[in-house]
Amino acid sequence: MKRYIRLLSLLLLLLPLTGCWDRVEVNDVAIVDVVGIDKAPNGLLLTVSIVVPELAAPGKGDGAGSKGEGATVIFSAEGETVMDASMQIQERLSRQLFWAHARALVLGEEYARAGVRSALDFWSRHREPRLRMKVAVTPGSAREFVQAKPALEHLLSEAIRETINQRLQTDVTVKEFLGWLRSETEEAFAPRVTTVRRSKGQDALISGTALFRDDRLIGWLSDQQTRGLLWLRGEIRTSVATIPIPAGGSVSVKLIRSRTQIKPEFQNGKLKRIRAIVAVEDDVYESSAPIDLGKVEIVQTIQGMLAKEIKERITLTVETLQKQFGVDVVEFGDAVYRAAPRLWEAGLKRRWADEFRQVPVEVEVTARVKRTGELAAPLGIEEQRVKKSPKEMLQRKE
Amino acid sequence: MGAPLCIAKTGSGDHEREIIADWGDVSLATNTRNAPDQIIEALKQEALQGALQPNLDRLHQLFKDCSDVVGHQFAPNKEIRCCMLFIDGLVQKDLIARDIIAPMLQTNVSSDVRQLLEEITPMGDAKVITTMGDVVLQVLSGDAVLLVDGATEAISYGVRHWEARSVSEPSTETVIRGPHEGFVETLRFNTVLIRRKIRSPKLKMVHRTIGTLTQTSVVVSYIEGVATPGVVQEVLDRLERIELDSIDGILESGYIEELIEDSSFSPFPQAQYTERPDVVAANLLEGRVAILVDGTPFVLIVPAVFAQFMQASEDYYIRFMMSSAIRALRYVFLFVALLLPSLYVAIVTFHQEMLPTNLLLSVAASREGVPFPAFVEAMMMEITFEILRESGIRLPKTIGQAVSIVGALVIGESAVRAGLVSAPLVIVVSVTGISSFAIPRYNAAIAIRMLRFPLIFLAGFLGLFGIVAGLCGILIHLCSLRSFGVPYLTPLAPLNWQVLRDVFIRAPHWWRRQRPRLVGQLNPIRSGKDLKPSPPPWRAP
């Protein structure tokens, strides 16, 4: 028994010997919120916004740190690498830089055009930052963007994250971005982020997409084109299409669910074409047209118009990607590889950059409008004026 | 009625001195053996004398200065004198007068005590005794002993009656639905409460007397054919070990618990205790053994496994869905009570990346300006909580309220205002405290509460790694623990699906047909197959 007690007390003594060597209290860390990287003459300019907990904590937003005035302190430093620059910032800080809660990485346009690989190594190697961080590219200076004081959220990262989570634009994490950089055939992209001025403070605005070839920014997709990219990638979650009706007024439909299939077709050991098959299901949310939505033929006609509308959006994006930029951000290459891995390895992979530019892409959209609402025709339209057949509906209002 | 023994006639001086010498020898002998004195055992070797006077002399010597012992001498006829010996207050004096002394005075009594007992004073709970030790023991137990001149035997009449607490609702185990009766301090009442629930000759109650001075009655109760004979034998053997190794007194079943448990150095209780007869009956039906001790309302139940401490008697009385949900929730509470403060310390000091960002920000904001590391802060608050809890138990109910108000206000509100502790920690400590009260068995709950201190310590030095190490240690200990040979973690380890129906959930009675394996394996089936009720085949008109 005595032996055990002695042994136990020796073991207990071992505990304090560790001396809590990596103990850091929460009030001794500087929580990094948003990271911005810009180009500097020799290397890069790192900008971090560091949260002041008292100002940012939910429920404590009274007084000085209310919305639109910012709850962060901005630090910038130049360095050869991110680590180098971060040490320069650390020298000016009373607390230890803590990367684990940084939620957004914003790359400045100039830096992105010069190549981002060197900076991103930090995110693949350092232990603290998360791979789930969002990546965005800002036209102009990332440093200026990081200084934005959001009007609606407490923190800028929250504003970026929540805006991206609306899924109206592309959503890219560091993990995905690194994966694309690693891949030989797929190319990287990231949402384009700017600030908009509000009556008090600024908010993040996500619109458009930055396209990369290898690790260099080569151009931008517009807002419209980005929607097409989302359709192609099957990532679209929210979409409202408004279809003008020749007989007058228009019908607004909202996306319920959609499914995108990329089907490559081969002929004589060669890639013949790529079919992008999109099946969407929509509901009518608003109608100002004098038509009877209770009639099957009318709904079928609307379905056809909707499919055409979506097809146009997608085709526009495919053409821009193939003709203007020639970067496969849709991951057509991946679909080809999965359909014919031997062909892919045999040569398609090597000449994919050219192949992607040339391959005919056929966009096929089937749309279904399922629920039209309680009312067949809008209120306040006389019964005899309501069009009850597609023919009447398609006649232009005189 | 009667007169104290001290005024009875004393014997000659020589005799008295002789007795004193004897007496001295006995006590001296026991002292040199370095064991508690065995007066009764020694006296049991001493036969009663054939005459009344020497016996009275001897008794007078033994009960010297015992003012509560009464020796009532009377003479039914000219030749024979008798003495009724009892302890004032422990017997029904009117019963003695009516059923023993009055019949004797009306008939011709001889010195044949067996005839006297059978023909003149028949009584249910009476027996003939022959040694001085028995006389002393019976008197002290509350019986009236009749010594008759010229007889070498005496009669002990069971006329015990004393003021006792009546059967009332147990304050430690209250229920909303279920019987409101609880055990009391009197052993006989307690056996009755069990017997009334299980009316079967298979319910056995083995009597033992333990404690050289207290001579406490202990009853081992079990159901023959359900309880494993090996376990019953083990219980009796362990009780006998206490008897043989002689302890001076047993005042509460806690003494027995500590003297018969498998592993002394374990924070976990290896015997369940209860104040409720229905709990005892249910456990007897599962094949367990109950140990009743005179002088305490707490009955021990062995063997006890960990799952038992998470079961409340009410679980079996309310609808099974509700009790299953509540029971599952209790296991959540168990882990909250054990782990929450240490997780807080570990995450706040070592693993800040594990919190959601917004939560981290509010924790960080509230910790701004707190002068202590999270470990010290948590220890301080947990100890304060234990102080409040402990003082609340000891204090009278009215003052206890004041303490809880002071505790809630001063510790909770003021400490946060003063910036001594952070607000999240106050929440952590109070949630932990409340969770620990949700564990139905107090002795298990207190084990969990105490174990969280070493865990906080480990968390403060080693973070989550320390918590995991501590949990592994606890798990290894639980796996190696046995209660009367039954693994403590059954039916989890060793795994038994049948019995698991009564662990994380409470299966309906018609589905819970088997007794727990390892305690009831002798007769595992407890009910028929078709117990599940269903609507009748006909339709109501």
Image: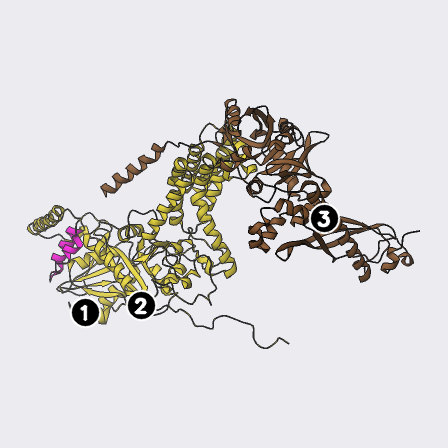
Dominant SS of magenta comes to helix
**Location of residue A89 in the rendering, given as x and y in whole percent from the top left corner:** 53, 24
The shade of chain A is brown
Query: Is residue B54 on the magenta stretch?
Result: yes
Q: Secondary structure at mark 3?
A: helix
Please identify the quarter of the rendering in which residue A101 is found. top right
Residue hosting label 1 = B114
Residue at screen point 72% across, 40% down: A223
Label 1 or label 2, whichever lies nearer to me, is 2
Q: Is residue B384 above or below residue B45?
A: above
Q: Is the residue under label 1 in contact with that under label 3 (CB below 8 Å)?
A: no
Nearer to the camera, A128 or B497 = A128
Please identify the quarter of the rendering in which residue A188 is found. top right
| Region of the chain picked out in magenta, as a range | B37-62
Q: Is residue B479 visible?
A: yes
Residue hosting label 3 = A314
Dot 1, how many residues are within 10 Å of its Cα: few (below 14), some (14-19), or many (20+)?
Answer: some
**Location of residue B75 in the rendering, given as x and y in whole percent from the top left corner:** 18, 62
Mark sitting on residue B224: 2
**Location of residue A170 in the rendering, given as x and y in whole percent from the top left corner:** 65, 42
* Separation of marks 2 and 3 at Cα, in angstroms: 82 Å
Residue at screen point 31% across, 62% down: B221
Nearer to the camera, A379 or B287 = A379
Say which chain is yellow: B
Q: Chain of mark 3?
A: A
| Amino acid of disc 1 | Arg
- Direction top: furthest residue: A92
**What kind of colouring is applied to the model shown?**
by chain
